[in-house]
Image (cartoon, rainbow, N blue to C red):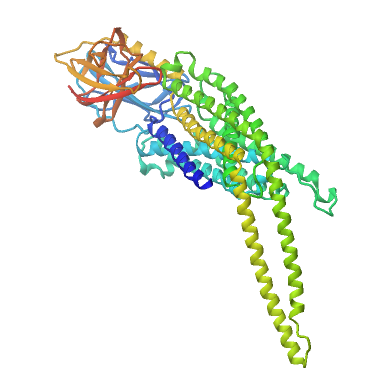
Amino acid sequence: MTQTIAPRVRILVLLILAVAGALLAGAAPASAHAALTGSDPAQGAVVDTAPAQISLTFSEPIAVGDDSVRVLDPKGERVDKGAPAGLSGTTYSVRLLSGLPDGTYTVAYQVVSADSHPVAGAYTFSIGAPSETTVSVSAQGSDDGLVGWLYGFGRYVSYAGFVVLAGGAAFVLACWAPGARVRAVQRLVVSGWLALTAATLGLLLLRGSYTTSGKVGDIFDLELLGDVLQTKTGAALVSRLLLLAAAALFIAVLFGAYARTAPAGADGDADGAKKPAEGEAEGDRGEPDKRDLTFGLALGGTVVAAGLAASWAMSEHASQGLQPGVAMPVDVVHLLAVAAWLGGLTTLLVALYRGPVETPVGRDAVRRFSRLAFGSVVTLAVTGVYQSWRQLGSWSAFTDTRYGQLLLVKIALVAVMVAVAYLSRRWTHRLAEARISAAEEEKRPAVSARSEETEASEEEEKQPAGTAPAEASDASEASGASEAKKTKAGHDAVRAAQLARQRAATEAARQKRLRDADPNRFGLRRSVLAEAGVAVVLLAVTTVLTQTEPGRTEQEAKAAAATSSSAAEGTGQGSGAVSLTMPFDTGGRNGKGVVSIDLDPARVGDNSLHVYVEGPDGTPVDVPEVKLALTLTAQDIGPLPVAPDHVTTGHWSASAVQIPMAGDWKVEVTVRTSDIDQVTVSRNAQIG
């Protein structure tokens, strides 16, 4: 049976990893969690006289540098002076040179949001009237390319490492004390520590390049590293490294002194106590000292795990927005519950498949973990409701924003895990009877084996006596016989050791076959494997969520862009238009159609834009959402977002769409046909 199980297990694991990889690969680069919600002059605005300064307002506090905001005239020359000055926690201004001529000016910004993510973008405004521009904005976006991918991968590995490290240790201390002796469990927890440590060091090195240039060559720039260490995120990463040093000491004690006191049975006591050996008094074994060791490990491990979780809470979503003083402790508790559940589940899976035959995971250990997992799920539900309210702000954000859609997927995965866990609990109840019957079967062969050993020893005792010579004629013959007996005794000892090893191997193989053939244990292993598979995908979705713009912020940015687009006024010049037609297929029901875009006059400056959506039969159809973005890749301008207003069935429009310079522009259109089905299509157009 085990030969047929193993290939299925490998196939399922590969499928799980493929799904997780597809989620990570399909995820957009780390979105800007601080959005530009306002500017003065406004995006696309035409002012009569040159302003003395421009100001930018973001949805949350940001960190700026000397070159974070640049203003370029139509010839591409900088007209700003001095470093950006903070007018408030979310608004920054930069002064402009006096006497600026009429024309279209480009504002490019590169800042870091307070929750550690880089924010880059550009927009235009005009003085007097729009004009042609030769702006060349150098590449500042850093969340694309190799560095952005490595940083995102490092975040995923760090979360996975923390879950395995904290959850594995909690499983050993709270559920299965004998697991401290199991080599597979030790390797798992140590691997979690190594993964988290390596990922943290990598993130610390990548951070400078990730928030500035995005160049691989800047990863080992010591000056950038020094700047990172002075930021909140840098301090959080350094704190995590220091806590990992304490975690290393915790692991050494857990798998050292604690493992030596752990019981050798299948379940053992949760506190790690072990009965005294025969001939030893209770006080000689130091039971109070063992309880103190277990209590100290539990307390110290909780403090270290909470500190590691706080290193995320103090530098990401929870540290900004509404009620940060409440959100950060809630986020710490949420992460600890995730680790206890998913990390403990991973350890249980390893113990079921890789644990030694003589120390199997019993019903009591699984029951204890079931109670721990139930408490973790309740904690996740309570803290998750609060986090959802804080990050979304409205019911519509569940379906209208990417963050809300991912959150719905996460909720569905949690529900699936709970259902599978219920099946695991049913198999656990049946495990006790299987253990009793297996114990009875193992007892009989053990008695017969001892009888065989006794008979063999009696024969061995008789054999030397029978082989001794009946009469010794002289001293030399006696000496030779003695040497012969010693040689034969040596051969007999080697043979006996070989036989003992063979019997032990045979007995271990037989016990393993009995264990694997147990239908109850097989059912438990299968359900736990399925639960762990869903957990891997859940962890991937959670990591993508941390890199996605919160729904509340996305909706604020949409509202600001729509207001700016409708308020801007311009004077389009020339004639002519660009028309683009792109088929789309979101993959869902009624997800196929054609989207058409008309840009008039398709010149530098002010333009009007119309979007038409038709079904496969050519009739106009309405879809829940249409978004556009314009990018001039050659000059690293954009993406410039456009939020068209719905006019009538299948028709959206936007006025005063500013094109800062001529070139081959990439026009991206995102069409959403249902709550979860959407697709982005693009085409290039020569404008100007």
> Which residue is at 70% across, 46% downward?
439
Horizontal arrangement in the rendering, residue 270 relative to residue 383 (left or right): right
> Which residue is at 74% across, 83% downward?
482
Using the image as rendered, state which of residue 388 and residue 215 is in the foreground: 388
> Which residue is at 74% across, 70% downward?
459
Counting from the top left corner in percent of width and height, residue 552 is at 46, 17
Using the image as rendered, state which of residue 343 and residue 499 is in the foreground: 499
Using the image as rendered, state which of residue 68 and residue 351 is in the foreground: 351
Residue 226 appears in the rendering: no
Horizontal arrangement in the rendering, residue 254 relative to residue 387 (left or right): right
Rendered-image quadrant of the C terminus: top left
Horizontal arrangement in the rendering, residue 305 relative to residue 72 (left or right): right
Horizontal arrangement in the rendering, residue 120 relative to residue 537 (left or right): left
The image quarter containing residue 634 is top left
Residue 240 appears in the rendering: yes
The image quarter containing residue 134 is top left
- State the count of labels: 0
42 lies above or below 482:
above
**Which residue sits furthest top?**
648
298 lies above or below 256:
above
Using the image as rendered, state which of residue 138 and residue 613 is in the foreground: 613
518 lies above or below 681:
below
Counting from the top left corner in percent of width and height, residue 297 is at 69, 41
Counting from the top left corner in percent of width and height, residue 653 is at 27, 11
**Which residue sits furthest bottom?**
474
Counting from the top left corner in percent of width and height, residue 14 is at 44, 40
